Amino acid sequence: MHKDDEVSSAPILYLVSHASGELVELLARNTVAQLDGVSIDMRLWKMVRNLGQAADILGVIATRRGYVLHSVADREVRGALEQGCGRLGVPCRFVLEPFVPDLAEYYGATIRFRASVRDLMDEDYFRRVEAMKYTLSHDDGVAADHLDEADVILVGVSRATKTPTCLYLASRGIKAANVPLVPGVPLPDGLTRARNPLIVGLTVNPAHLARVRGARLRMLSEERTTDYAADEAVETEVREARRLFSRNRWPVIDVTNKPIEQTANRIMKLLSERTARAE
């Protein structure tokens, strides 16, 4: 089993269970056994029954992406987990798919997922839940006209790790939104009007960013000619982004080859310093 603090380059399979984890782990082990020559780390979470736990799990997944198999029965928790994985571009599969829908259709039955027993809910739980809901609904420029409730807004070019960093921050109870910088597209009014949030610019080494974008295009089997991963175009994007950050006096973090936790910790430190100055 994958240890929490262990660093590994092997592909990782995340297992999330609302109960003991026996079902999802059994299915995962038997499935992996059918794959020839593949060594996979597995990380299992048991008794996942509230949104606070889902927030924590998404924070971990954001730092190291992998495939997610789950058996979460609660609709709200399942929805948050699957939506968060979708934002991260991480595949997430309910282990009883497609058996439940197929059987329900065959027998003409209604699908009923059991509601979970509510665990102890304290102030920290509700803070993390609200943060995760806010972050999921303000990802990648969505609802950009309503950003003043955010604690922090991350601004940067495409593939600058904005979404995973926001989800990690949300797992710590921080309402994080992000706004992408797209060539030729003006900043949303909500960003320029925002006065309460800390706005942070994320930058990346252009050569590194071009490689990351090229890999992304190959993964998507994108064959059309585009400037998205072209060295000169990427360098121009990054340069213009830095100028924007400088004009607005936003703090800047270079995320090149930097773990998500390190970027998030720097942002949390900036938030703490900002709060201390205000007090």
Image (tube, rainbow, N blue to C red):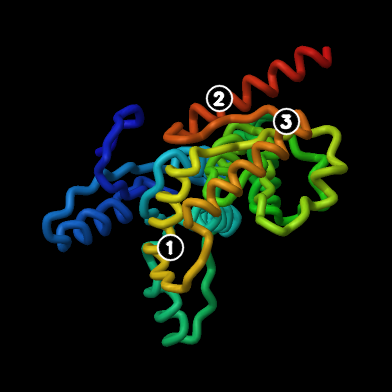
Question: In the current view of this chain or complex, which residue is farthest to the left?
Answer: 37
- The mark closer to the camera, 2 or 3, is 3
From the image, tell me which residue sits under label 3.
250
Which kind of residue does numbered mark 3 sit on?
Answer: Trp
Label 3's element?
loop
Is residue 166 or residue 32 the one in the foreground? Answer: 166
The residue pinned by badge 1 equals: 217
Q: Amino acid at mark 1?
A: Leu
Task: Tell whether label 2 touches label 1 (CB within 8 Å).
Answer: no
Instruction: Please report contact status of discs 2 and 3: CB closer than 8 Å, yes or no.
Output: no
Q: Residues within 10 Å of mark 2 (few under 14, many from 20)?
A: some
In the rendered view, tell whether residue 112 sits above or below residue 24. below
Mark 2 = which residue? 265
Residue at figure coordinates x 73%, y 34% from the top left: 199
CA–CA distance between discs 1 and 2?
30 Å
Question: The C terminus lies in which quarter of the figure?
Answer: top right
Where is residue 38? Give x, y as percent: 17, 53
Left or right: 145, with 57 as reference point: right
Disc 2 is placed on an element classified as helix
Q: Is residue 105 above or below residue 112?
A: below
For residue 242, above or below residue 188: above
